[in-house]
Image (cartoon, rainbow, N blue to C red):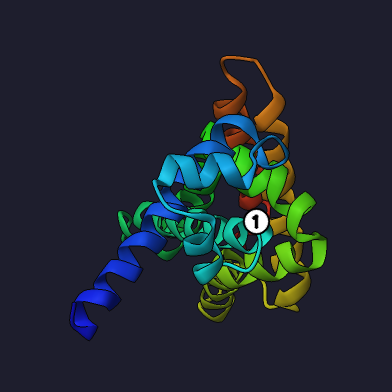
């Protein structure tokens, strides 16, 4: 087997490990899934797993990164569907809450993510994945006068925290209108930021 074929096989093994562990973590939670179950589902040896990841937590981190990237893509797609910068902010925030209502996202990113990775690492990953986009959107709106000029770092953290908290609440809520009600409350909160002429 040549080098290119080996590299392709290694990458396929890594993708399989991430895919299968993601499926298991989403269905059962991080704590209930063992390495033996992961390698069995992926059809690889523990040695192959350890070639790619030095621990179950490292594998889980790769899964969280993948989920966060997908949520970021959903948020960007929601925002990009609108032309007006204000509508982009609102649509992106609504898309984040909708993505957070997905049981797989809830279990991996919102429930197990902070518990397994630790709050500081989880926050850093969250900031890299989505808070940066929120900060950029708020900066553009402040620059254009849609919202008042103000220190944007605290506002970004307040909005990000509110949306993460709402998504965590949605993960355990049971009401059929909870997502729609939460999105409506978020829109009312965002509207309070707009400068009225």
Along the horizontal axis of the image, is 152 left or right of 12?
right
Where's residue 108, x and y in %? 61, 45
Front one among 42 and 100: 42
The local secondary structure at tag 1 comes to: helix
Residue 197 shows in the view: no
Q: Name which residue lies at 75% across and 79% down.
A: 151
- Quadrant position of the N terminus in the picture: bottom left
Along the horizontal axis of the image, is 117 left or right of 127?
right
Residue 108 shows in the view: yes
Front one among 57 and 40: 40
Label 1 crowd bin: few (<14), some (14–19), many (20+), radius 10 Å: some
The single residue placed furthest to the bottom in the displayed view is 3
- Quadrant position of the C terminus in the picture: bottom right
Where's residue 132, x and y in %? 58, 73
Q: Name which residue lies at 79% across and 50% down.
A: 115
Residue under label 1, please give it. 56
Front one among 79 and 54: 54
Q: Where is 121 relative to 87, above or below? A: below
Q: Where is 42 relative to 152, above or below? A: above
Along the horizontal axis of the image, is 85 left or right of 131?
left
Where's residue 87, x and y in %? 43, 55
Where's residue 28, x and y in %? 62, 31
> On the image, which quarter does residue 160 sit in?
bottom right
Q: Name which residue lies at 66% across and 31% down.
A: 171
């Amino acid at each position: 087997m040549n080098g290119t074929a080996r590299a392709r096989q290694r990458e396929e093994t890594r993708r399989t490990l991430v895919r299968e562990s993601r499926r298991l973590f989403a269905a059962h939670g991080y704590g209930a899934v063992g390495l033996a179950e992961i390698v069995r589902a992926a059809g690889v040896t523990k040695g192959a797993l350890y070639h790619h990841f030095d621990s179950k937590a490292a594998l889980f981190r790769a899964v969280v990164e993948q989920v966060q990237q997908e949520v970021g893509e959903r948020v960007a797609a929601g925002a990009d569907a609108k032309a007006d910068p204000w509508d982009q902010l609102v649509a992106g925030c609504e898309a984040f809450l909708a993505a957070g209502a997905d049981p797989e996202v809830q279990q991996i990113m919102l429930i197990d993510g902070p518990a397994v990775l630790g709050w500081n690492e989880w926050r850093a990953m969250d900031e890299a994945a989505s808070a940066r986009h929120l900060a950029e959107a708020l900066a553009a709106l402040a620059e254009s006068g849609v919202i008042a000029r103000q220190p944007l770092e605290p506002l970004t953290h307040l909005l990000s925290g509110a949306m993460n908290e709402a998504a965590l609440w949605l993960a355990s809520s049971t009401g059929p209108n909870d997502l729609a009600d939460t999105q409506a409350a978020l829109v009312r909160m965002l509207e309070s930021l707009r400068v009225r002429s």
